[in-house]
């Protein structure tokens, strides 16, 4: 299946436009993370997660639960869960283990006071101490860094050229930092599910990049009659349909989760949708052009088109057949 019949887009000629856009995305994302930081979930800061439910038919709304908790001095994040009974997820950050453990008892007491005819029950209770949250945040950062380093080593080994791996990881960095910067700017919560989305985006992005790199390597080995620019352009154009189709399949699922998956999966789906768009853009218009830019500046220019000696080609083919 092909979406485009023999496309002929001059990606290398237009390379500075997407490269400049990527530089802007990275700069703005880093600026947001430096100035605003992240809205970390309790997994990274420490605190208590409660899932509470009320009897079926109870007229309990998010606003009422929030008001009951705020009257006790809590600044709790509240999330409604669809189901046969009014169910809510409460997240409260804590500065020490004692406060994290005491939140559950105080929250239930305040809700019983606000709703005496509808007894709240605890369906789930998770308590994470601040020390554990800090350690988990450190481990998560190392997981992302080591993943990028692993991809760097793998691509360098597969293509026998570290420059190709550096270009691929720069494209990955653009994708991951772009999504992280968006979450920082919008103040969306950064939790383990979003970290999973970031690593998934990196995997999809490098997979598409390797497909284009593989086609480039084949052409560089087999075709000695065309310049580097035309070979890279033809490699991107020949794999364009495959790249778009692959991304569309992921985007259809991600968009479905975004609009119909409920509030629990909304931010995860948003990260996947934005990350896939950034990954496709960087794969097509950033990674390969960076390889080209390095080759013409530091790796020696490949000669431009050289006329083919038809007689020599026929003689070579005749010898091969014999």
Image (cartoon, rainbow, N blue to C red):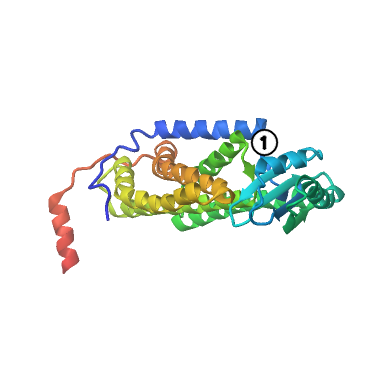
Q: Quadrant of residue 221?
A: bottom left
Front residue of 227 and 28: 28
Residue at 13% x, 50% y is: 310
Please, is residue 16 above or below residue 126 in the view? above
| Position of residue 59 measured from the top left corner of the image (x, y, whole percent) | 65, 48
Q: Quadrant of the N terminus?
A: bottom left
- Left/right placement of residue 244 relative to residue 276 reads left
Residue furthest to the right in view is 98
Residue furthest to the front in view is 117
| Position of residue 67 measured from the top left corner of the image (x, y, whole percent) | 73, 39
Residue 184 in view here: yes
Residue 168 in view here: no
Residue at 17% x, 54% y is: 313
Please, is residue 176 above or below residue 34 in the view? below
Instruction: Say what secondary structure mark 1 lies in.
Output: loop
Front residue of 87 and 301: 87
Please, is residue 126 above or below residue 66 in the view? below
Residue at 71% x, 44% y is: 65
- Left/right placement of residue 280 relative to residue 122 reads left
| Position of residue 215 measured from the top left corner of the image (x, y, whole percent) | 34, 53
- Left/right placement of residue 256 relative to residue 223 reads right
Look at mark 1 in the image and give the residue it sits on.
37
Front residue of 104 and 197: 104
Residue at 61% x, 32% y is: 32
- Callout 1 environment at 10 Å: few (<14), some (14 to 19), or many (20+)? some
Q: Quadrant of the C terminus?
A: bottom left
- Left/right placement of residue 128 relative to residue 282 reads right
């Amino acid at each position: 299946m092909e979406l485009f019949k023999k496309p002929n887009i001059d990606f290398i000629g237009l390379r500075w436009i997407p490269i400049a856009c990527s530089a802007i995305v990275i700069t703005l994302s880093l600026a947001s993370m430096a100035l605003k930081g992240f809205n970390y979930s309790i997994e990274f800061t420490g605190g208590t997660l409660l899932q509470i439910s009320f009897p079926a038919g109870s007229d309990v709304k998010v606003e009422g639960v929030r008001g009951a908790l705020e009257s006790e001095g809590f600044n709790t994040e509240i999330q409604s869960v669809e189901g046969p009974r009014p169910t809510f997820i409460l997240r409260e950050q804590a500065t020490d283990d004692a406060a994290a453990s005491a939140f559950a008892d105080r929250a239930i007491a305040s809700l019983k006071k606000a709703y005496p005819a509808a007894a709240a029950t605890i369906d789930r209770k998770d308590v994470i101490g601040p020390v554990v949250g800090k350690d988990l945040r450190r481990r998560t950062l190392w997981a992302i860094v080591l993943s990028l380093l692993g991809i760097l080593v793998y691509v360098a080994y597969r293509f026998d050229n570290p420059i190709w791996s550096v270009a691929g990881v720069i494209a990955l960095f653009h994708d991951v930092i772009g999504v992280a910067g968006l979450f920082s700017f919008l103040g969306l919560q950064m939790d383990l599910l979003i970290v999973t989305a970031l690593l998934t985006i990196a995997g999809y992005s490098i997979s598409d990049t390797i497909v284009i790199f593989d086609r480039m390597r084949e052409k560089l080995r087999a075709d000695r009659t065309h310049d580097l620019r035309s070979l890279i352009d033809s490699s991107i154009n020949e794999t364009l349909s495959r790249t778009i189709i692959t991304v569309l399949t992921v985007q259809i699922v991600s968009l479905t989760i975004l609009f119909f998956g409920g509030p629990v999966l909304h931010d995860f789906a948003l990260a996947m949708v934005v990350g896939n768009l950034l990954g496709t853009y960087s794969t097509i218009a950033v990674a390969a052009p960076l390889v080209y830019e390095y080759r013409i500046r530091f790796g020696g220019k490949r000669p431009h088109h050289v006329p083919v000696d038809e007689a020599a080609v026929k003689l070579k083919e005749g010898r091969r057949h014999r």
